[in-house]
Image: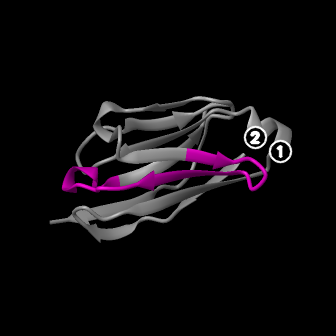
Amino acid sequence: VQLQASGGGSVQVGGSLRLSCAASGVILSAFSRNSMVWYRQAPGKEREFVADITLSATNYADFVKGRFTISRDNVKRRVYLQMNDLEPEDTAVYYCHSTAYNSWGQGTLVTVSS
């Protein structure tokens, strides 16, 4: 499975971005059963969990609850991360990850400035 993340950019504090992760090389039935995860890595810090989505459940890191929403479109084989009310601390490279295939996207950079 190949993953391609996109949608990053530069925004000001309080702004919004929608990240997208497109999966290829996987059939629909397999993708729909696959748990997908967003991680992020800020400069000089370790990669950290942001959110994940399974068949019917979502989980979020405490620092994004109420601001970020993860969703998926299985037909399009895409996973999204809607990020609202962005803060400078959200500046990082965001990666999507497939747990079943242990596959990582190349990352997309989000920069939040005050």
Q: Amino acid at mark 2?
A: Phe
The answer to which image quadrant residue 88 occupies is bottom left
Instruction: From the image, tell me which residue sits under label 1.
Output: 28
The x, y position of residue 63, in whole percent, is 28, 37
Tell me the quadrant of the picture where the C terminus can be found.
bottom left
The x, y position of residue 57, in whole percent, is 58, 29
Please say whether residue 67 is one of the residues in the magenta stretch. Answer: no
Please say whether residue 76 is one of the residues in the magenta stretch. Answer: yes
Q: Is the residue marked by circle 1 packed among few (<14), some (14-19), or many (20+) residues within 10 Å?
A: some
Q: Amino acid at mark 1?
A: Leu
Q: Which residues are magenta?
A: 71-92
Is the residue 1 above or below the residue 113 in the image? above
In this picture, residue 24 sits left or right of residue 5: right
The answer to which image quadrant residue 109 occupies is bottom left
- The residue shown at (74%, 47%) is 74
In this picture, residue 96 sits left or right of residue 34: left
- The residue shown at (23%, 46%) is 44
Q: Which label was assigned to residue 31? A: 2
Circle 1 sits in a helix, a strand or a loop, which is it? Answer: helix
